[in-house]
Amino acid sequence: MASLAQMERELIVERTKAGLEAARRLGRVGGRKRRMTESKVESARQLLVSGMPPKDVAQNLGVSVPTLYRWLPASSRQSGE
C-alpha cells in the first residue's frame, strides 16, 4: 500500500508541475500582486523630497512605512536634493 501511495503522490507532483509550466507559457504569474507600482514609487519619491513625513506618504499610498523604505532606500530618497 505504501508503494501505491508513493506512486500516486509522484503522479500528483508531476501533474502539478506540468500545470504550472503550462500556465507560465500562457503568461500567468503566481503569487500576490505587488502593492508598490512604478507610479507609486515615483509619487512616494516626489512626496518625500517635498518634505512630507514618511508615515503620511505610506498612509497616502496604502502601504506600511517598512514597505515604503524597502522600495525607496535612503540613497534614492535624497536624489532630488
Image: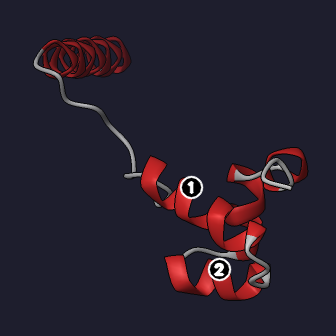
Question: From this viewpoint, which residue is outermost toward the front?
Answer: 81
Numbered circle sitting on residue 41: 1
Cα gap from disc 2 to disc 1, whole angstroms: 11 Å
- What is the three-letter code of the residue carrying label 1? Val
Image x and y of residue 47, in percent: 65, 73
Q: Nearer the viewer, residue 43 or 73?
A: 43
Examine the rendered structure and indicate whether residue 26 appears above or below residue 53.
above
Name the element at disc 1: helix
Q: Nearer the viewer, residue 72 or 14?
A: 72
> Which of pointers 2 and 1 lies earlier in the amino acid sequence?
1
Q: Quadrant of the C terminus?
A: bottom right
Q: Nearer the viewer, residue 55 or 39?
A: 39
Examine the rendered structure and indicate whether residue 61 appears above or below residue 27.
below
- What is the three-letter code of the residue carrying label 2? Val
Image x and y of residue 68, in percent: 69, 64
Image x and y of residue 44, in percent: 61, 66
Numbered circle sitting on residue 57: 2
Determine the image quadrant of residue 57. bottom right
